[in-house]
């Protein structure tokens, strides 16, 4: 699914109004109804609601929401913040529709801001996608007072004060929302870790923006929905044999870290690979043969570290390399050999990333259009350098993808996938329980298996990350987030794939 910028959202708005022959006030009514529907499900009628409205259409939405909640018999108070002479036309219309129902209070000075007790349900309708400068003055005073209260804050469309698709200047105040209810599509800002404290728990409510506009508009920003993942997943053929589903090679594991190889291998097998061979340092041979009987195991001549490539390496469709390897010199040399001789698709993780990041020569020998890197933020920083903020980091990541014609899966709450063409895909599955050792090794196994089965590198990244998060979400239901370990994610891969196939 596409993510739209603030400018594109405005165009979608105008397009929809024209296409349906409605007015902008009708669309505002629709948006406010969608918000109110969510709000009513969440909060009891007995709750007291304070709505804080800014001067634009976000404030206009707030007015309509107030009217609708008042009609449903909620106790609602409206506060108009700032200069109400300069409000948007739709705000004005809705202010007139509201004013015969109840009076509103104006806030132009700090002492007019009401006390906000913990039991009040605050609706933040100060600013949305039209914010064009940092929030200061009386608006900032209101934001600070709301943040300092321990009331539950629900933001309409955006937490006020944050830019929807570019870096917000540091001097402005920003609402710290408990919930953010966004119209039609999430905003890029929601998907960046730096905004977690402001956005809170976000949900999207549909408001019927034109499908035609959304399908035709050009963008390089996407987020993966369940339907997107289902579209990518290929059905297994009726007359199947294991040869069709590829033969993957995993070069993982080191002394004291053979578990990483076990985790990657088990996840690879649970993701549909036809055949799997592992090569591990000789100390790991019996471990792998015992823990993963479905895989074939080759023993490296070195007892503790990866030190050689298998002889008949051409027969594999894909090589997954990195988990548990360590950064010994002999391993570095072996990775150098692999990069300079291999014609394979490569899934590169963990210490293999660290090794490549430390050498310009190795970076220069990366084969083009054949590599997927799966770093966590620290490994990415080693690979591409330090960035000032999340927007710069994504830009730098895409520059790296372009320069080296590779794919990067940046692991995190909303893992981000960068492609050589400059597209960014954000994942929507997963949970904090997955922030535990070994879940990255599981992801390496999954993506390696998908590449072996002939998914394109882009498809393998998108589907792999989605199904990994989905398995984590299913694991959450049975083991919770505190006790979750990486094997729980693998154990729920069967259910996750069945869920995508609509078999469960
Ligand atoms: N398609 C959709 O999804 C739909 C969207 N809808 C809703 O519309 C919202 C977008 O509305 P919007 O464009 O009127 O912008 P909004 O955020 O209300 O604020 C802009 C106003 O504030 C001002 N201003 C800006 N920055 C400022 C600052 N720092 N400090 C002080 N003032 C500042 C600026 O005026 P300026 O002073 O720049 O002339 C302008 O007056 C969107 O988020 C959603 O809630 C629905 O109604 C219908 C369908
Ligand atoms: K808002």
Image (cartoon, helix red, strand yellow):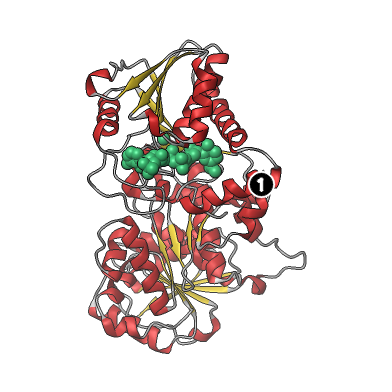
Quadrant hosting ligand 2? top left
Measured from the top left, where is residue 281 in percent x and y?
Answer: 34, 73
Residue 200 location in percent, x, y? 38, 36
Q: Quadrant of the C terminus?
A: top right
Q: Is mark 1 within 8 Å of ligand 1?
A: no
User: In the structure shown, which secondary structural element does the residue marked by tag 1 occupy?
Assistant: helix
Q: Is residue 434 above or below residue 93?
A: below
Give whichever of 277, 431 is nearer the camera: 431
Asked whether, in this view, residue 377 is left or right of residue 277, the answer is left
Q: Is residue 141 left or right of residue 457?
A: left
Q: Quadrant of the N terminus?
A: bottom right
Between 214 and 374, the one nearer to me in the picture: 214
Residue 292: percent from left, percent from top: 48, 61
Q: Residue at x 49, y 57 (%)?
A: 465
Q: Residue at x 70, y 62 (%)?
A: 236
Please identify the residue farthest to the right as the structure is shown.
238
Number of numbered discs visible in the structure rendering: 1
Q: Is residue 90 visible?
A: yes
Counting from the top left corner in percent of width and height, residue 278 is at 45, 72
Q: Residue at x 24, y 34 (%)?
A: 137
- In front of the other: 12 or 153: 12
Instruction: Tell me which corner region of the image, top left, top right, bottom left or bottom right, holds residue 403.
Output: bottom left
Left or right for 214, reference 342: right
- Mark 1, Cα crowd under 10 Å, few <14 / some 14-19 / many 20+, is few
- Tell which residue pokes out farthest to the front in this image: 85
Q: Which residue reaches farthest bottom?
A: 341
Say whether residue 323 is left or right of residue 100.
left
- Residue in front for this viewpoint, 98 or 275: 98
Q: Is residue 203 visible?
A: no
Name the residue beneath numbered marker 1.
18
């Amino acid at each position: 699914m596409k993510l739209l910028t603030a400018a594109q959202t405005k165009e979608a708005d105008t397009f929809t109004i024209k296409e349906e022959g409605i007015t902008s006030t009708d669309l505002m009514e629709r948006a406010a109804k969608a918000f109110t529907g969510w709000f009513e499900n969440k909060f009891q009628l007995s709750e007291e609601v304070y709505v804080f409205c800014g001067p634009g259409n976000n404030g206009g939405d707030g007015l309509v929401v107030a009217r609708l909640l008042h009609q449903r018999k909620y106790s609602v108070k409206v506060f108009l913040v700032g200069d109400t002479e300069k409000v948007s036309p739709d705000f004005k219309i809705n202010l007139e529709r509201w004013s015969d129902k109840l009076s509103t209070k104006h806030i132009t000075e700090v002492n007019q801001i009401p006390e906000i007790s913990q039991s009040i349900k605050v609706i933040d309708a100060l600013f949305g996608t039209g914010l064009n400068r940092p929030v200061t003055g009386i608006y900032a005073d209101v934001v600070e007072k709301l943040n300092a209260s321990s009331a539950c804050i629900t933001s309409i469309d955006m937490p006020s004060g944050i830019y929807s698709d570019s870096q917000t200047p540091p001097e402005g105040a920003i609402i710290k929302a408990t919930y953010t209810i966004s119209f039609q599509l999430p905003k890029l800002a929601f998907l960046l870790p730096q905004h977690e404290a402001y956005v809170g728990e976000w949900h999207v409510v549909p408001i019927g923006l034109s499908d035609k506009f959304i399908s035709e508009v050009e963008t390089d920003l996407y987020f993966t929905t369940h339907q997107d993942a289902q579209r990518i997943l290929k059905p297994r053929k009726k007359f199947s044999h294991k040869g069709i589903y590829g033969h993957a090679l995993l070069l993982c594991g080191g002394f004291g870290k053979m578990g990483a190889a076990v985790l990657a291998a088990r996840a690879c097998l649970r993701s549909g690979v036809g055949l799997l061979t592992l090569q591990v340092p000789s100390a790991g041979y019996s471990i792998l043969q015992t823990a993963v009987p479905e895989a074939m195991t080759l023993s490296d001549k070195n007892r503790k570290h990866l030190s050689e490539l298998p002889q008949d390496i051409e027969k594999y469709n894909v090589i997954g390399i990195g988990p548990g390897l360590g950064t010994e010199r002999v391993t570095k040399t072996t990775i150098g050999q692999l990069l300079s001789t291999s014609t394979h698709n490569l899934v590169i993780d963990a210490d293999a990333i660290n090794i490549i990041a430390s050498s310009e020569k190795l970076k220069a020998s990366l084969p083009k259009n054949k590599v997927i890197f799966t770093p966590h933020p620290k490994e990415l920083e080693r690979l591409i350098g330090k960035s000032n903020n999340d927007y710069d980091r994504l830009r730098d990541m895409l520059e790296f993808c372009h320069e080296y014609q590779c794919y990067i899966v940046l692991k995190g709450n909303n893992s981000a996938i960068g492609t050589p063409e400059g597209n960014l895909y954000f994942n929507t599955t997963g949970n904090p329980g997955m922030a535990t050792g070994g879940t990255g090794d599981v992801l390496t196994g999954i993506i390696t298996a998908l590449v072996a089965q002939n998914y394109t590198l882009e498809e393998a990244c998108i589907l792999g990350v989605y199904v990994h998060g989905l398995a984590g979400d299913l694991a959450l239901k049975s083991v919770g987030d505190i006790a979750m370990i990486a094997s729980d994610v693998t154990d729920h891969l069967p259910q996750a794939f069945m869920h995508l196939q609509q078999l469960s």
